[in-house]
């Protein structure tokens, strides 16, 4: 464990005959110990649901069965403002995948909404532990009413996690590891920065680190080198054709929007939405696809308008920049425009064809929500990771555009690691690492969890996940959410 001890018990050697008072004190201490042991045994004998629901502010939404686990969907009462709890509360959804209180626990968040289908993150399988998952504040239904958007920031969200951890640590007393992918990996990192004593380790997957929002040349360099020249040219030409054919393509888009009752109030017009989707195409390809998939991309100029529309829709999603597509992600774009930052790409191959360029987050948030960018937030996080991080692991994808601006370790980092999965996209994970790095990463995670290193206990090779693969629990759908966002 890398955690500091919270208390020290000192013993004094007594010489001579024990006094009656000393004997009485000893008896009292023994009685207290016995009472404490009985209380602990009684608590352990209680049903886990009863123990969890005994936590003040915790309520049950539903329990779902899964072999080998108990799975609960819960609400937890959180203050809207952790600096001023008297200013009101809201209900934040969490889920609990319970295995055993004697096992370590993984704290997972996507940084977005919460799936209420039982799922297991990779670190949970690696350590064969429990998993607590938390919905990020302001994603519905975990949104205060009325919504004071100034209370949506990385510190308030980290404080949500801290309170959930504090509440459940009394039941799940073994080691804890924070994890998440993409914005979830960012969230796990921010949690560690503000509450470094809570977790025993952090595994952050494909987490971008936009330290300077005005300097995005790293993304330009990435897009100019990723894959082969032939592939990059094919992707560029799809974008060019879509903008050259803007008129007939937008007629298809208009019909598509009408058929699905889509509107464009937030972004401002169908034209703005259309261009935003087209500009996402190349980024979206590398975020969700592999280099080998480029062979399936047709020559753009040979495609009929409807086929070109479908190709772009399959990768970038024409529904996303509609009001209906953007509304669920208002909290993300609000944070991108106030703290996190967002990419701005040069696009020299589209010179003279674009009208708006990469649009800022402000264009994707309703105008009645005020926004002001704080350029110190990410600089603070970056400096902390470089100078103070302990027990942190960053796993990136070689061909993932979001990994163009990654977290980096510095001279002050201790027991921390950065891995890059060869050829991987935004779904990069420990399992995709080369064999030696895979074994080292698993050993580290198990060490942080207090269940290893497991390699020392095995006779059949390097460290492996302690839990067997479960097709339902370990299912990952990378393409479930499409858009240029982490």
Image (cartoon, rainbow, N blue to C red):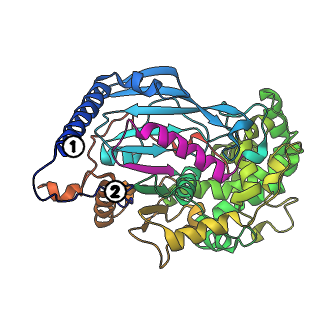
Q: If you read the primary sequence from the N terminus, does the residue marked by circle 1 or circle 2 appear first?
A: 1
How busy is the neighbourhood of tag 2: few (under 14 within 10 Å), some, or many (20 plus)? many
How many discs appear? 2
Q: Is residue 132 magenta?
A: no
Mark 2 sits on what residue?
A: 448
Task: Please tell me which residue is depicted at 29% across the width and 31% down the height of the picture.
Answer: 40
Residue 441 at x, y percent in the picture: 34, 61
Residue 68 at x, y percent in the picture: 30, 28
Question: What kind of element bears circle 2?
Answer: helix
The residue stretch that appears in magenta: 152-180
Judge by depth and name the residue closer to the eye, 416 or 264. 416
Is residue 214 toward the left or the right of residue 473 in the image?
right
Q: CA distance from mark 1 to mark 2?
A: 44 Å
Q: Quadrant of the N terminus?
A: bottom left
Residue 109 at x, y percent in the picture: 53, 44
Residue 483 at x, y percent in the picture: 67, 48
In this rendering, the answer to whether 150 lies above or below 410 is: above
Task: Please tell me which residue is depicted at 89% across the width and 42% down the height of the picture.
Answer: 368
In this rendering, the answer to whether 370 lies above or below 212 is: above
Question: What kind of element bears circle 1?
Answer: helix
Task: Please tell me which residue is depicted at 76% across the width and 60% down the height of the picture.
Answer: 240
Mark 1 sits on what residue?
A: 21
Query: Can you tell which quarter of the image residue 349 is in?
Result: bottom right
């Amino acid at each position: 464990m890398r955690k500091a001890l919270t208390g020290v018990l000192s013993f004094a050697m007594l010489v001579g005959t024990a006094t009656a008072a000393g004997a009485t004190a000893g008896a009292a201490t023994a009685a207290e110990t016995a009472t404490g042991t009985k209380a602990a045994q009684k608590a352990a004998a209680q049903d886990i649901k009863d123990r969890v629901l005994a936590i003040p502010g915790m309520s049950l939404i539903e329990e779902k069965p899964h072999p080998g686990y108990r799975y609960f969907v819960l609400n937890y009462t959180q203050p809207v403002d952790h600096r001023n709890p008297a200013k009101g509360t809201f209900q934040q959804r969490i889920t609990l995948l319970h295995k055993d209180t004697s096992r370590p626990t993984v704290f997972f968040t996507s940084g977005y909404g919460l799936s209420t289908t039982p799922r297991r993150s990779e670190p949970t399988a690696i350590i064969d532990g429990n998993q607590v998952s938390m919905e990020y504040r302001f994603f519905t239904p975990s949104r205060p009413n009325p919504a004071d958007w100034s209370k949506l920031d990385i510190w308030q969200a980290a404080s949500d996690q801290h309170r959930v951890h504090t509440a459940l640590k009394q039941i799940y007393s073994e080691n804890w590891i924070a994890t998440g992918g993409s914005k979830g990996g960012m969230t796990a990192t921010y949690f560690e920065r503000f509450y470094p004593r809570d977790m025993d380790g952090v595994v952050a997957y494909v987490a971008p680190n936009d330290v300077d929002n005005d300097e995005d040349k790293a993304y330009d360099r990435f897009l100019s080198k990723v894959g082969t020249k032939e592939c990059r040219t094919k992707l560029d030409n799809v974008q060019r054709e879509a903008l050259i054919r803007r008129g007939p393509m937008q007629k298809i888009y208009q019909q598509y929007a009408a058929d699905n009752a889509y509107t464009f109030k937030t972004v401002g017009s169908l034209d703005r939405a259309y261009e935003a989707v087209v500009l996402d195409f190349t980024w979206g390809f590398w975020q969700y696809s592999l280099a080998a998939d480029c062979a399936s991309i047709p020559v753009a100029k040979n495609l009929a308008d409807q086929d070109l529309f479908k190709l772009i829709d399959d990768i970038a999603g024409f529904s996303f920049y509609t009001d209906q597509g953007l509304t669920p992600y208002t909290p993300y774009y609000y944070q991108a425009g106030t703290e996190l930052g967002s990419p701005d790409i040069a696009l020299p191959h589209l010179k003279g064809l674009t009208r708006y360029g990469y649009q800022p987050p402000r264009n994707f948030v309703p105008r009645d929500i005020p926004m002001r960018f704080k350029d110190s937030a990410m600089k603070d996080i970056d400096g902390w990771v470089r100078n103070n991080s302990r027990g942190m692991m960053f796993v990136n994808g070689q061909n993932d555009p979001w990994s163009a601006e990654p977290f980096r370790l510095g001279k002050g980092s201790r027991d921390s690691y950065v891995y890059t999965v060869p050829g991987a996209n935004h779904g990069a994970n420990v399992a995709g690492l080369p064999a030696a790095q895979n074994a080292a990463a698993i050993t580290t995670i198990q060490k942080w969890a207090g269940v290893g290193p497991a390699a020392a206990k095995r006779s059949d090779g390097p460290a492996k996940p302690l839990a067997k693969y479960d097709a339902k629990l370990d299912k990952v759908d990378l393409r479930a959410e499409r858009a240029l966002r982490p």
